[in-house]
Image: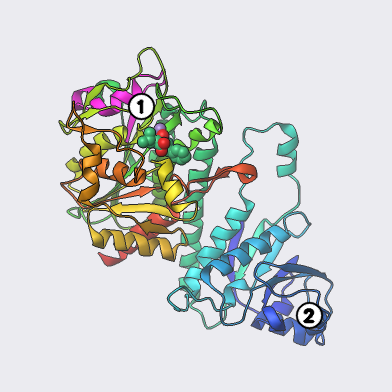
Amino acid sequence: MEFSIKSGKSEKQRNDCVIVGIYESGKLSHAAQAIDDSSEGFLTKLLKRGDMDGKVASSLLLHNVRGTNSERILLVGLGKHDELSDKAYRKAAIASIKALAKIGARDVASFLAEVDVINANNKKLDPSWKIAQMVEAVNDALYRFDVMKGKKDKADKESTKGINKLDIFVSEQDDNQEAKIALKQGIALSSGVSLAKDLGNLPPNVCTPTYLAEQALAMVKSHGLTVQVLGREEMKKLGMGSFLGVAQGSAQPPKLIILQHLRGEKNQKPVVLVGKGITFDTGGISLKPGAEMDEMKYDMCGAASVLGTFKAIAEMDLQLNVIGIIPTCENMPDADAIRPGDVLTSMSGQTIEVLNTDAEGRLILCDALTYAERFEPSSVVDIATLTGACVIALGHHASGLFSNQDRLAKELLSAGEESLDRAWHMPLWEEYQPQLDSNFADVANIGGRAGGSITAACFLSRFTKKYHWAHLDIAGTAWNSGKEKGSTGRPVPLLTEFLKKRAAKI
Ligand code: BES
Ligand code: MN
Ligand code: ZN
């Protein structure tokens, strides 16, 4: 897919298709108005006939419209005039690409980025936002995961249908230089999101801890990162008894992957991202029920989001120091697997009674969070498909956000709003902590059914006292189930936006 920034008149473009927006009640966007004017009111007539209502994401394809230079015009609904929200804009952008998926229009001009968009605070969004969102929407609409499919589907992929070139039109007054930077950043973000999606969608027999480590190592050359991979022996020396406990039931060797993107000032304290990388979660001896267990291949989406974010910020050349830590292993039942009742000693020295081997994410994260201390971080954010309880609490639209510092929480919340990858602030109150009391160790790894996502965060909070920390529970947002099953790439947009803002502040 090739993107470029252009400005010019909608009726004059010679692309295979020109995309313009129309509103409910027949109001036309500037680009649609220009086409209407040069076609003797063709669009107005057509809307009067009632063939298109302008509802958000509706569309109508027209051919050979008189007075225009393009073979096709695609009308896309933008809803009520003056009320186009950020989310509706994204929907319309996706709909416009999907409407062209199966026809011969390859070289397309979109005028949707010219329309006014307002966010929830009634703020008019700038052209940079509209361009970057457009790129993401397009890549989202065109994303396919077919590397594991046979010949037939591959042939479909190589067909000569669907968009392969998109000119994004901005109005002449807009700063072209800024628009080009926004385009570059949108492309970088999309490539990070795609990586996160691919890693999530890969089957668990391919995407193993070793595979994730190899992907990280490949980014040394391609993206100028420094990468270090620790194996079982090194982790033993560090005293990571909790992480290694989970890993001991699997034939796949565990890895601790450390990524460094150091493009800020030398003495600038880094932001550390920690991603849960369980490449398959059977539950271990506390075995999960069979239904939908395949979806536990997505239990490494926290890790995937760290790798995706590093790809995005490297391609943006973000001037910031960022460290990534990925503890990765499988959670399997085995003769050698940990049992309910086992007590593990974590790297922090705290002992943990394993009451349920399916609460394994926190067991690998706690050691990675202790390891993070050595980087003297400005903040640490962990990302994990941690609890089914978070899905019950928030459903599939918001990631759960927990933090020991309100300012950091606010930064992440607003990055989520801005990137349309939202999180919701959950409590981390002391009152929940006693649910983790153990009769036999310093802490239990489960806290009962009540507030399950909160007690999971409380567990992690016992290992993050030395720095500002936030935890994103992405169990409900990292992938879609059912017919549309597939990784979403979230929360790469949120994390990337957060880091961009950090870099701008320094
Ligand atoms: N990876 C799961 C969380 C999960 C479950 C995410 C379903 C998305 C969908 C995690 O390791 C887990 O199994 N958590 C348990 C914790 C419980 C044993 C306290 C859960 O949520 O059931
Ligand atoms: Mn589990
Ligand atoms: Zn898990």
Between the residue at mark 2 and the residue at mark 1, the CA separation in whole angstroms equals 61 Å
Residue at mark 1: 357
Residue reaching furthest to the top: 335
Residue located beneath label 2 in the image? 47
Q: Is residue 72 magenta?
A: no
The image position of residue 458, as x and y in percent, is: 26, 44
Residue 249 falls in which quadrant of the image? Answer: top left
Mark 1, ligand 2, within 8 Å: the answer is yes
Give above or below for 110 relative to 307. Answer: below
Residue at image position (47%, 28%) is 288
**What SS does tag 2 mark?**
helix
The answer to whether 66 appears left or right of 454 in the picture is right
| Residue 67, percent from left and from top | 81, 81
- Which of these two is toward me, 23 or 137? 23
Residue type (three-letter) at the residue carrying disc 2: Leu
Callout 2: 10 Å neighbours few (<14), some, many (20+)? some
Picture coordinates of residue 317, whole percent (x, y): 38, 56
Image coordinates for residue 337, horizontal then vertical, percent: 35, 18
Asked if residue 495 lies left or right of residue 204, the reply is: left
Front in this rendered view, residue 237 or 310: 237
Of pointers 2 and 1, the one earlier in the residue sequence: 2
The residue lying at 28 percent from left, 22 percent from top is 341
Placement of 428 over or under 24, stated as above or below? above
Would you say residue 240 sits in the magenta stretch?
Answer: yes
Whether residue 217 is visible here, answered yes or no, is no
Q: Is residue 161 visible?
A: yes
The residues colored magenta run 236-257
